[in-house]
Amino acid sequence: MGNGSRFARSTGPDRWPAGVLGRRGPSLMGAVVLALATVVAGSVGCSRGPRGARHVVFISLDTARADHFGFMGSEVAATPRLDALAAESIVFTDYMTVVPTTLASHVSLLTGKYAHHHGTPRNGFMVNPRNEMLPEILRREGFRTAGFAGSFALDDRFDFGQGFDHYDQEFDVRVGQKGADQDQRTAEEVTDAVIRYLDERGVPERLFLFVHYFDPHAPYAAPAPFDTMYDPAGREGLPSTHFVKRSPDLTDAERAEYARRLSLQYASEISYTDHHVGRLLDELDSRGVLDHSLVVVTSDHGESLWEHDEEFDHGLTVYQSTMHAVCVMRLPGGEGGGTRVEDLVASVDVLPTVLRFLGFDVPVDADGEEVPLREAERRVGGRVRFGEATKPWGDVETDPRWLNARKARCVRDGRHKLIRTPYRGTEELYDVPTDPAEREDLLPPLHAETGRLAEGLRERLAAWSASAAPLPSSFEPSQREETIRRLRSLGYLE
């Protein structure tokens, strides 16, 4: 049986608040369980594919930067529960989201399509029912499907819940830092909701479980004892807004200090979420679900901590701070655990990977490609992936074909990344492995080789942009003012 001691080795007990370590690790890697997992994984009826998983557990961490997890090298945020899971999983170290806001990103995750094909440009828009989403596919294949949303951004009024037999969005309404109501709920409440569902319904023969945690999203306000985990003062003395650059009464020194402390509060939210993800894993473990599951943990996008134009926010740019996200996949029984895939993989690749692992066909209109999990050591290099921003709103959205057509977008060939922002008329080129913070723009080209490289990426990005053929979508019309108010309180409108 696993136990919490492996967590102490991950982060050191002095970095974790007293009384919040998990009661055991999430894997139960004892010999008996391993033997059972092998039998179950290969048994008739688990999936149409060989040695598939009986269940799929899909955990989404909103606004979670890749560099704030121990298994990704964080020296700030402690994430012992996810570190332990990652040790038994396949970790995609160069994983990028294709769109850095919640709704559009999740639709890409669950359809395998770029936003300019699935048609949902940003939060507050409808998900076109012609999209075939992962829960719809799995329900057709005999899975019971249950989803738990942590934020109003994934409210079913936007038709995000299509394909779920049970979709839980019982949000807590709490007062945010600006005094605005926010429809969301804490990680504790999300995990509790899943536990209640499992208590009431039990575990079916096949289960697709989607669980969305929203806490790392601004404003950063983790509950005690996490709020003082990295800053003894907690939120005391911090401004009410996370847009500190726009606060006219602050000096430059005050802004810098507030930015430092806000970054620590963000890390606290990551650690708080990790703890309650651990509770979920424990519950799944105790019910015999975990080792018969394909477990996917991913983040929909990262967060800018004021490295570039955005302050403590996301959606305006396509820099690595918001595009480099988290993705780990744990196979039944922890098979292949410890594998690290360093090649470029994107969020559109998640759906094809999950479906092919289960032995199911991938929709023909998916943009992504499978990563062969049982051969994950084999390189999957050579992929070119694209991304697009969803902000700003308003005057920028003038192209009738696609609302994001003039916003920041990028193309990556693995090593190099070209960023174009049409509404600003700017272009940038970065060597991501040597410059992950994207500080050294390689343009204008200093020599012919750089010029040829930029031109090749420019042509790829132009062709991808021209391929936009979005399914129809519109801003959700019913209760429009309520939708606008809530999106504004979440930082998506200004």
Image: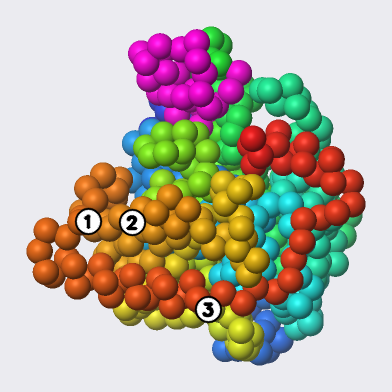
User: What colouring method underlies this structural image?
Assistant: rainbow
Q: Are marks 1 and 2 in contact (CB under 8 Å)?
A: yes
Q: Which residues are magenta?
A: 240-268
**What is the tally of numbered marks visible in this picture?**
3
Q: Is residue 329 visible?
A: no
Residue 133, horizontal then vertical, whole percent: 71, 73
Q: Earlier in the sequence, mark 2 or mark 3?
A: 2
Residue 437 sits above or below residue 347 on the image: above
Q: Which quadrant holds the N terminus?
A: bottom right
Q: What SS does tag 3 mark?
A: loop
**Residue type, numbered disc 1:** Leu
Viewer-closest of 3 and 327: 327
327 horizontally vs 380: left or right: right
**Residue marked by disc 1:** 443
Identify residue type, mark 3. Answer: Ser
Which amino acid type is shown beneath numbered disc 2?
Answer: Glu
Mark sitting on residue 427: 2
Q: Nearer the viewer, residue 2 or 195?
A: 195
Question: For this rendering, which residue is in front, 425 or 271?
Answer: 425
Q: Residue visible at 55% across and 33% down?
A: 269
Q: Position of residue 158 (x, y in %)?
A: 79, 58
Q: CA distance from mark 1 to mark 2?
A: 8 Å
Q: Main secondary structure of the magenta part?
A: helix
